[in-house]
Amino acid sequence: MSFWKYLAPEEVAAPARTFAQEVVRPVADQIDNDDVYPIELVAATAKRGWNTMTLPARYGGGGASMVDALAVFEELGAASASLGVSLITILQSSKIIELYGTESLKERVLPRYAQGLRASYALTESGRGSDITSLDTKAHLTDRGWVIKGEKAFITSGSAADFFVVLAETPVGVSAFAVERDAHGVSTRETREAETFGLRNGPHVNLILDEVEVPQDALIGVEGQGLKQAMVTLSNSRTLAAGISLGIARAAFDDAFEHVRSREAFGGKILDLQGIQWYFAEAAADIDAARLLCYEAARDLDDNTDYQRSSSSAKLVAARLATQVAGMAVQVCGARGTQETSPFGRYFRDAKAYEVAGGSNEILKNTIAKRLIRAAQSPAA
């Protein structure tokens, strides 16, 4: 029996929970240990329609709400955050094309996601981190289309991606482009510095763009508006990242509870100790509250209300909470919590990594503060 009720329709969430427990969880530790992109699992989720849930039906998607998508990501994240982050990059790339791409680009690319297209979102550059307001990767227009030159760094899912959304600077500002992996001049390289201790879905890569020519409609949206487009897309992905963090917190809670419920010490079960019970009572209350916040953020996206604030709040709270709950799980499980053969180390590493990845806590706080200041300056305030 689960401690966690469905906050989306059961017919949406229940199949994801079953798949997560029966198919994903048994291989989650191996994915983490080997640091590999879970190609087979991503293909399986595509067959179930989870890679294209929110895309319109005319492009092969399910036309589902962000609330439904959040429920699926939460369940899959509880089994393997590595799988969850693999799906995040797929959603990011499809969402920006759906929202801003030309119709010709949409028709050429979006139906491939339902067929299992693996994609990556290439924003970051070496030395710039979260600052993507100006870029060393450049693009210029020719008679044949756009030519892109530069190098992106620390690209999640890049080791197995068939397709990239790339941010590059053009003469009028940062712009977004659709780039096929097999385009001439595209290559990747792995670096030792790009290996991470959490959210391990294959080594991050540097994406090298050596005078890569792409069609004119590979420009996504309006030239110079790539940064704004990326921020809207990140509001969607941050909400789903918050769902993955919820899943991590739940998994750590569930496994720790099962351990202390069956473990005997000092003449009784560890769970009989009031101090241990309080650990779980506080964690359960915090997870319940964080889940409500995350689903509110998903509804804001569906309703097109102030999703920048709520999505940032959701990820900030959920990622921070996941680290706290994973740490609690290690503590109450004692030696078992520290063993390499237990999943608790994976939960803790994944949770902490998501306080940095996909929008660091500090960046999220900046976004929330900007929304508060804007609201205070509004005539309606």
Image: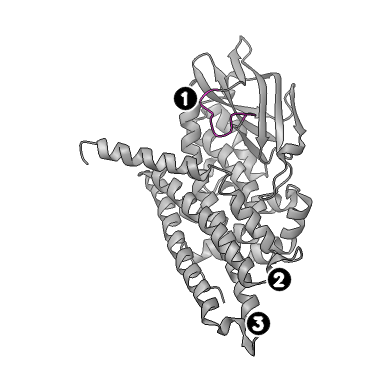
Which residue matches tag 3?
A: 262
The furthest residue to the top: 143
Calculate the distance from the C-alpha at mark 3 to the C-alpha at mark 1: 56 Å
Q: Is residue 133 left or right of residue 44?
A: left
Which residue matches tag 2?
A: 336
Residue lying at 57% horizontally and 57% vertically, measured from the top left: 323
Query: Is the residue 343 above or below the residue 374 in the image?
Result: below
Residue lying at 55% horizontally and 63% vertically, measured from the top left: 325
Amino acid type, label 1: Gln
Q: Nearer the viewer, residue 321 or 71?
A: 321
Mark 1, other Cα within 10 Å: few <14 / some 14–19 / many ≥20: some
Mark 3 / mark 1, whichever is N-terminal: 1
Nearer to us: label 3 or label 1: 3
Report x, y in % for residue 175. Answer: 53, 23
Task: State the predominant SS element of the stretch in magenta.
Answer: loop
Q: Which residues are magenta?
A: 125-134
Residue 160 visible within the image: yes
Which residue matches tag 1?
A: 225
Q: Secondary structure at mark 3?
A: helix
